[in-house]
Image: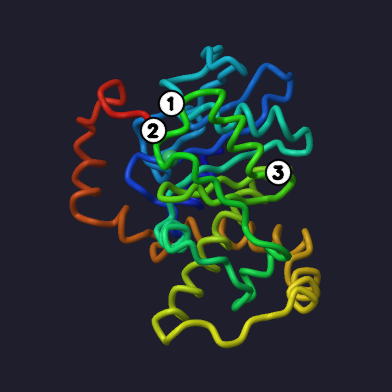
Amino acid sequence: MATGCRVLAGNGHSDYIWGHAALRDPDGRGVWMKSSGIGFEETTPDDVVLVDFDGSVLAGRGRPHREWPIHTEVLRARPDVHAVVHSHPPHAIALGAAEAPLLPVSHAATLFAPGPLPRFDRTANLILTPELGVEVARALGERSALLLVNHGIVVAAADLPTAVVHAILLEDACRQQLLTAALGGARRWSSDEEALAKRETLWPPSNLRAMWAYLVRQLDQPSSSTAANSSPAAAAAASSGSASAANVPRP
Ligand SMILES: [Zn+2]
């Protein structure tokens, strides 16, 4: 969990202390979530909390993010899913706000082909109730990723490395499309047939695992730090140790 959170932080998903990931408890008790009040880049193996399907804390350190129903309801609806990521990557949020469909203008986008990327737009507010969690899970359907319009993304996968890599590639795909928009918009993109063929060529599980291994190796490289977690303000906050997890919002 800690490694997955740190990889997300270094690759476009850092949003101060917001965003979370969760893993299905192997004994069926609920989900292990990243604790609230800390950034992805700060997460250690101890910063996880076990929440049951009704939101009760069963074990772990800290408090869960209040959006635990995203994780519990996606996992309840999808027996094939064991890991869920929810984050606020800026390019994906921009694409969602523009109501623009994600087009296969890049390699990354073909991972989410074919068909339009699912969207959830009943509310842009936090997903704080099981009822809303159920609706998010319903909007996700059998897909791997969902745009929460004006809010963020939800990614679901069989394991955390796959979920993390999907989240990163989704943000890459959205960023590429926004770059294209700056040049007047896409004039060419892959057909469904080509996108599917590219997906098979580019994104077999072995490639996703290799990308994950690369991202983990990069954690040890000084250049892997993000603008957010290398900013003076973030560095000062991290070094002061004065922020109290008990007193910060828990989205
Ligand atoms: Zn959120």
Residue 173 lies left or right of residue 206; in this view the side is left
Where in the figure is residue 234, as x and y percent of width and height? 24, 48
Dot label at residue 109: none
Residue drawn at point x = 19 percent, y = 50 percent: 233
The picture places residue 68, in percent across and down from the top left corner, at 51, 27
Q: Nearer the viewer, mark 3 or mark 1?
A: 3
- Marks 1 and 2, Cα distance to the nearest angstrom? 5 Å
Question: Could you tell me which secondary element the residue under label 1 belongs to?
Answer: loop
**Left or right of 115, for residue 117:** left
Quadrant of the rendered image holding ligand 1: top left
Q: Which numbered disc, 2 or 3, marks the residue closer to the eye?
A: 3
Q: Is mark 3 within 8 Å of ligand 1?
A: no
Q: Is residue 76 left or right of residue 7?
A: right
Disc with the residue nearer the chain's start (1 vs 2):
1
From mark 2 to mark 3, how far is it between C-alphas?
A: 23 Å
Q: Which mark is residue 141?
A: 3
Q: Secondary structure at mark 2?
A: loop
Asked if the residues shown at circle 1 and circle 2 are in contact, with their CB atoms under 8 angstroms apart, the answer is yes
Q: Residues within 10 Å of mark 2 (few under 14, many from 20)?
A: some
What's the amino acid at mark 2? Pro
- State the residue at coordinates (48%, 56%): 219
Of 91 and 59, nearer the camera is: 91
Callout 3 touching callout 1 (CB < 8 Å): no
- Badge 2 is on which residue? 251
Q: Earlier in the sequence, mark 2 or mark 3?
A: 3
Foreground: 245 or 113? 113
Percent from the top left, x then y, of residue 20?
48, 38
Question: Residue 83 occupies which quadrant of the picture?
Answer: top right
Alpha-carbon span between mark 3 and mark 1: 23 Å
Q: Amino acid at mark 3?
A: Gly
Q: Which residue is mark 1?
A: 66
Query: Which image quadrant is residue 53 in?
Result: top right
